[in-house]
Amino acid sequence: MRVTHEWVCEYVETVASPQEIADTLTMLGHEVEAIEQSDLGAVLAVKVTPNRGDCLSVLGIARELAASDPMRFQPTELMREAIRGWTLGDEETPLSATSVTIETPDLCPRYAARVWNEAPMQASADWMQARLIACGMRPINVIVDTTNYVMLELGQPLHAFDLDRLREERIVVRTARPGEKMRTLDGIEREFSTEMMLICDAERPVAVAGVMGGEETEVTQATKRILLESAHFQPTSVRRTRRALNLPTEASHRFERHVDPEGVVRALNRFALLLSQQTGVAQERGVCDLYPGRSEPQPVQVREARWNLLLGMDVPRAAAAASLNSLGMRVAETEAGLTATPPSWRADIAIEEDLVEEIGRLAGYENMPERLPEGSTPQGGESALTSLRTRARDAMLRLGFIEVVTHSLRAPSPLDAPCEPIRLRNPASPEVSVLRNSLLPGLADAARRQHDDSFFLFEVGRVFLPEAERVCIAGLMRGQLLPEHWRSGHAAEVDVFTVKGALQEVGARLHRLPAFEQSNDERFHPAKQARVVVGGQEVGVMGELSRLLVERMHLQPSLFAFELDLTSLMELPEATPRYKPFSAFPHVRRDIAIEVPKDVPYVEIERRIRESAAGLLEEVWLFDVYEGKGIEEGKHSLGIAMTLRHMEKTLTDEEANEVREQVLQALASLGAKQR
């Protein structure tokens, strides 16, 4: 917010220079970003935090200065008159010239209006124009300029309607109807959704509540009569509408940060006085003031021990009470501390810590003593998840993969995880309308930009599921395994076993060895995919991407991918590496050929073999799969090799054959028989 030094001095009597005022405001938590020069002297550019909408005005800045040092910044008669509200004596008289209806009192707790039957369309006074220009506003005419002046002075936005253009001279505050449209003052026709709050006449919208007026009822040189609106709108409603319409204004900036509901009529009265001073025109007697959402500020308790603990210094109870009282709060003493009822303009005061902050601000942050931390210092280091993430990333880099980083906001993709992605309520564009629930769509975008036929890409990052955020690692690859200058003859290409090997290497690095089971993920080739399982829990998926999906996304063919949930892996116990001594005795190999139903997964067959040959089995692998002549329908023949070794002696043929028979007996329960 921009405010001139001389305007502030109309509200507080002080000899402080602009720099001294800037320093005081900065120490109060309102950083003055710059001091500029204008025809009126120094202009302060004050950075107001979002929770302090009450400071978006000259009155608000003056209140802060007066509270910080009452002897140095003494309120003037103008400030005292502003606090009293510039009463005109007709506030209790109903306004007969128009009627106002509030259909949404939860969104519009208060709405007030005054009427002028003479609307002088002339330039505003030179002094007013000079202040508006210094504060970054363009003078237009006396009506518009005075509304802007009051907004800067008191923080209450006002809007003037051409009363003769209001159908039936009525005001109705309601939400939009389906398909309702209006051309706003910027000349753009806008369509409204049903949750947006509008100001309407008897038939149509005439303004977007708290944001901008409509073109059809704007004040022009032909205007004869005006209706002046002053209202309090629900901040979240204004914010939602402003974001949806992408229509930021000075008014919405203030309404979003809370406007004092008790200052609504005060602003109307101030406008009437300023307009009368400049033109001699008086308002019609009476005010239309509807206040269906009146609510009393709730008292907040603060304990003396609590504010001393949080501030790190002892502030006497009397000093704390004086500080809160100077901010407009009603203060009462309790056994443990104080109870303070915040004023209507301080919607940010709700809990004990809010009061502690106010006590600390006025006590002076610069007065707080320096104190070394007490107690033991916790040992730093990586979190378990960060460590796991780092090791997984290192494993991928060692395998020759290239890391990419993609955006977490994106458009919906066929490669999204099966769950519904989280959609943004007001996305900037369709391309950034959802939070990613998988890393694969981003990798696919990166692959689409690759000009090489062979690539190995991976990403580590967060994905966003309906129930929680997860950290995942994903990879995407295709093409030749070796660089062109290393190839001889037929070069090996990436296949599903390449992906499996990469996952086994990552699992070894993380001390959590994966197993692979059948899966049915529509994103992958039905016969070339698997669930990645660790400790009986599914932690990922791998395989070749579906050819239909690849064509639909205009990707290169034969793409292989995987995705692992590192958050789930972190929650699983780590397999501690153990030393196993080498055997000095030779191994014995035994092969078996079994006929087994196709629906029996190989991982289950291998598990039974390892259980039945425990203690002697060193290695087991599948070396042959046969279907055709001599094999029953629905079955296939598997050739499996086993390496057996004893740690303390050489195995005899009889002992090796006995292990082989134990394995065959164990596999019989799966419907397997020896060929």
Image (cartoon, rainbow, N blue to C red):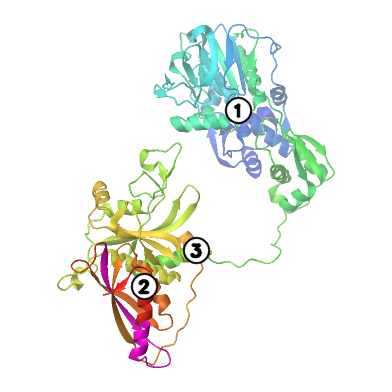
**Which residue is rendered at x = 81% and y = 44% of the image?**
337
Instruction: Give x and y (percent) for residue 168.
Output: 51, 7
Labels 2 & 1 near each other (Cβ < 8 A) = no
Residue 346 in view here: yes
Circle on res. 155: 1
Residue at far right of view: 335
Instruction: Give x and y (percent) for residue 179.
Output: 41, 22
Disc 3 to disc 2, how far (Cα)? 34 Å
Q: Is tag 3's residue or tag 2's residue first in the polypeptide sequence?
A: 3
Q: What range of the chain is rendered magenta?
A: 634-659
Task: Quadrant for residue 149, please give it.
Answer: top right
Q: Is tag 3's residue or tag 1's residue first in the polypeptide sequence?
A: 1
**Which residue is rendered at x = 55% and y = 12% of the image?**
227
Q: Is tag 2's residue or tag 1's residue first in the polypeptide sequence?
A: 1
Which residue in the structure is indicated by mark 2? 667
Comparing labels 3 and 1, the label whose residue is closer to the camera: 3
Comparing labels 2 and 1, the label whose residue is closer to the camera: 2
Q: Which amino acid type corresponds to the residue marked 1 in the rendered image? A: Gly
Which residue in the structure is indicated by mark 3? 570
Disc 3 to disc 1, how far (Cα)? 52 Å
Q: Tell me the SS state at disc 2.
A: helix
Comparing labels 3 and 2, the label whose residue is closer to the camera: 2
**Which residue is rendered at x = 40% and y = 84% of the image?**
616
